[in-house]
Image: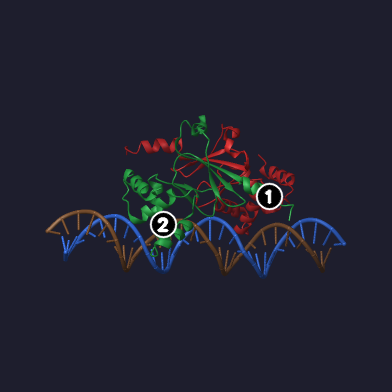
Chain colours: A green, B red, C blue, D brown
Amino acid sequence: MNTKKQAEQILRDGHVKPTSIRLEVLSYLLGTDQHPCVDQIYLDLKERIPTLSKASIYNSLHLLVEEHIIQKITIEDEKTRYDADHSTHSHFFCKGCGQVMDIEGLDPNDFKSPLLKEFEVDQIQIYYAGYCPACKVQKEDKTDE
Amino acid sequence: MNTKKQAEQILRDGHVKPTSIRLEVLSYLLGTDQHPCVDQIYLDLKERIPTLSKASIYNSLHLLVEEHIIQKITIEDEKTRYDADHSTHSHFFCKGCGQVMDIEGLDPNDFKSPLLKEFEVDQIQIYYAGYCPACKVQKEDKTDE
DNA sequence: TTATAAATTTGTAATCATTACAAACGAGGT
DNA sequence: ACCTCGTTTGTAATGATTACAAATTTATAA
């Protein structure tokens, strides 16, 4: 559970200088499955690093995305979320609780349309929207109370 | 090729009052495969309707999305695009020319992960990012000239 | 260690898409 | 023609993101 060590290794492997803020941001992302937005990352890290600036979060995130170490999730249009897992997997956005969760169990090769033969595909993002199990039940029970 | 008539029919079928701006917006979307953003729609329609306000474009688009007549495309994070085709199909975003194009030839049923059994899935969006055939060639030829 | 250069981080101001909202407008019914 | 209600408009507010210069830290060389 040493995300700091893990982060340092990933940065070195990617030939990105492991500065303090980069380590903090990547380590934070490695330690959560919540797909946080910039504000969430900022507020949580700010508690331990009072001098932290939001611009630094943006700097680090942009660099990490460019270097393909993390990925952007643009499932909602108001704000961008970030994910330390840059492999091809899909996300579910719950309209009820607003959470974004990982959906596994899909083979990325299923998404290679023959129409893409002539394209260079760098990234595949699959988004589902709807209601997660908990919110679905709650919605159906809205006749009570 | 009468997108105005088509738009009117779709609005009536969806029990949405076919006001002038709604007809203009839906008709515009039906007549293009460019997945335009709000500004594009606004600028193009403004030429024929000088009194047009951007707020009206937002009003109409929001209503049409709510009524499932069109769909939002949030493949880029700076701006939202819109598509009159609300069926499940995928989009390719070209990092070279910035275009968003439709990719057909994928069966939506392939995307039903067993993990989603307990979920209520309202929408599936599949995004590819990379380089389209034209931009791919151009990129590879960058040694010339 | 100290001096110097380079990169990073910070704070603030600017930008830009989107939202909020009140006033003006327009179609349908009386 | 008048009234009413929903639509459209214009403008101001919001909020995420970007730009950028100053302050700070890190790396390098003497």
Question: Which element type, helix, strand or loop, lies under badge 2?
Answer: helix
What amino acid type is highlighted by mark number 2? Ile
**Which residue position is annotated with label 2?**
A57
Q: Which mark is residue A139?
A: 1
- Crowding at dot 1, Cα within 10 Å, few <14 / some 14-19 / many 20+, comes out as few
On the image, the x and y values in percent for residue A109 come to 49, 31
On the image, the x and y values in percent for residue A88 come to 47, 39
Q: Chain of mark 2?
A: A
Q: Nearer the viewer, residue A108 or B129?
A: A108
Q: Chain of mark 1?
A: A
Q: Which mark is residue A84?
A: none
Q: Image quadrant for the C terminus of chain B?
A: top left
Cα distance in 3D space between marks 2 and 1: 36 Å
Residue appearing at x 56%, y 42% in the figure: B125
On the image, the x and y values in percent for residue A95 come to 61, 50
On the image, the x and y values in percent for residue C30 come to 87, 62
Specify which label sits upstream in the sequence, 2 or 1.
2
